[in-house]
């Protein structure tokens, strides 16, 4: 079965038919087109051309006249089916899981980058070396000037050199002790496990509950924070010390 697009000629030809002729063209389960670009069967056009009268002036058959300007009818594409509720719920769950994976990946990369930056940081900087040299030179010059009343210049020079050496050794010892203490603190911070405690969500004047549904007594400043995070991180040690101090004060008050 070939479907063609209805043209003005076809509509005009249908308009010249009587009701009986129209009923003979269109069976009970079909209807004749009423506007242009509607589909019409090729066999219906053949039957229509046989019903049309042919005049002496016509050189073409009525079928050729009706087919002039007609094109094959291409039906519009069917509408896209709507996704089912199960599909929508599945996509939403997968989207949330993907967002959580991306968040965890970003957090882990940030922490590893912070740790790498701490490890790769050079402990000896040009400014440190310059400060040590200035301390040695200035202390030696100060001792040399303080002993300007001495008659033996050799002793003054030796005393100045000894003072510079002592100051340099003291600077190095103090800085090495500082580096050792910093390294120990970093090791302690890395060994501690970060804790995240959900203390509830602030909802205006409503009652605040924890993850188990139990009521939580919390002030307005803490209620604005949905999660309490302390432990590792850039300021993890400071947060932990503040928390431990607050816990000790609470224990003493109770």
Image (cartoon, rainbow, N blue to C red):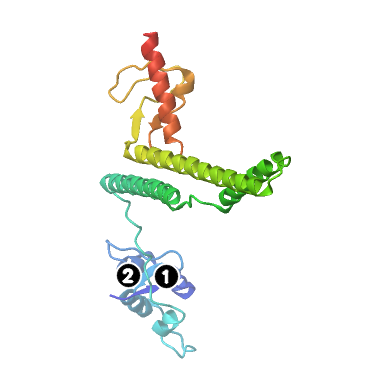
Give the position of the C terminus as an image quadrant: top left
Q: Tell me the residue at 64%/43% (across/down).
A: 139
Q: Is residue 130 above or below residue 27?
A: above
| Depth check, front residue: 110 or 247 | 247
Q: Position of residue 61 (x, y in %)?
A: 41, 86
The quarter of the picture where residue 147 lies is: top right
Coordinates of residue 187 in the picture (x, y in percent): 35, 41
Give the SS element for disc 1.
helix
Direction right: furthest residue: 149
Q: Few, some or many C-alpha atoms within 10 Å of disc 2 (few <14, some 14-19, many ≥20)?
A: many
Q: Earlier in the sequence, mark 2 or mark 1?
A: 1
Q: Which residue is mark 2?
A: 25
Q: How many marks?
A: 2
* Residue 207 can be seen, yes or no: no
The residue wearing badge 1 is: 14
Q: Residues within 10 Å of mark 1 (few under 14, many from 20)?
A: many
- Give left or right: position of 84 versus 69: left
């Amino acid at each position: 079965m070939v479907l063609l697009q209805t043209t003005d000629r076809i509509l005009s030809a249908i308009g010249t038919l009587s009701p009986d002729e129209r009923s003979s063209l269109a069976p009970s389960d079909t209807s004749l087109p009423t506007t242009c670009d509607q589909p019409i069967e090729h066999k219906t056009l053949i039957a229509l051309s046989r019903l049309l009268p042919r005049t002496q002036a016509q050189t073409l058959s009525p079928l050729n006249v009706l087919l002039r300007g007609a094109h094959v009818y291409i039906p519009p594409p069917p509408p896209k089916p709507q996704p089912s509720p199960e599909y929508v719920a599945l996509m939403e769950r997968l989207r949330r899981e993907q967002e959580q994976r991306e968040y965890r990946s970003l957090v882990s990369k940030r922490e590893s980058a912070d740790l790498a930056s701490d490890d790769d940081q050079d402990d000896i900087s040009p400014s440190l070396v310059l400060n040590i040299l200035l301390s040695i030179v200035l202390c030696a010059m100060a001792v040399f000037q303080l002993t300007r009343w001495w008659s033996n210049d050799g002793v003054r020079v030796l005393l100045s050199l000894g003072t510079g050496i002592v100051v340099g050794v003291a600077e190095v010892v103090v800085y090495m002790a500082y580096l050792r203490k910093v390294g120990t603190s970093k090791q302690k911070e890395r060994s501690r496990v970060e804790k995240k405690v959900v203390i509830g969500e602030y909802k205006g004047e409503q009652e605040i509950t924890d993850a188990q549904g139990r009521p939580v007594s919390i002030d307005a400043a803490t209620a604005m924070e949905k999660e309490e995070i302390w432990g590792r991180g850039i300021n993890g040690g400071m947060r932990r010390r503040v928390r431990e101090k607050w816990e000790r004060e609470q224990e003493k008050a109770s």
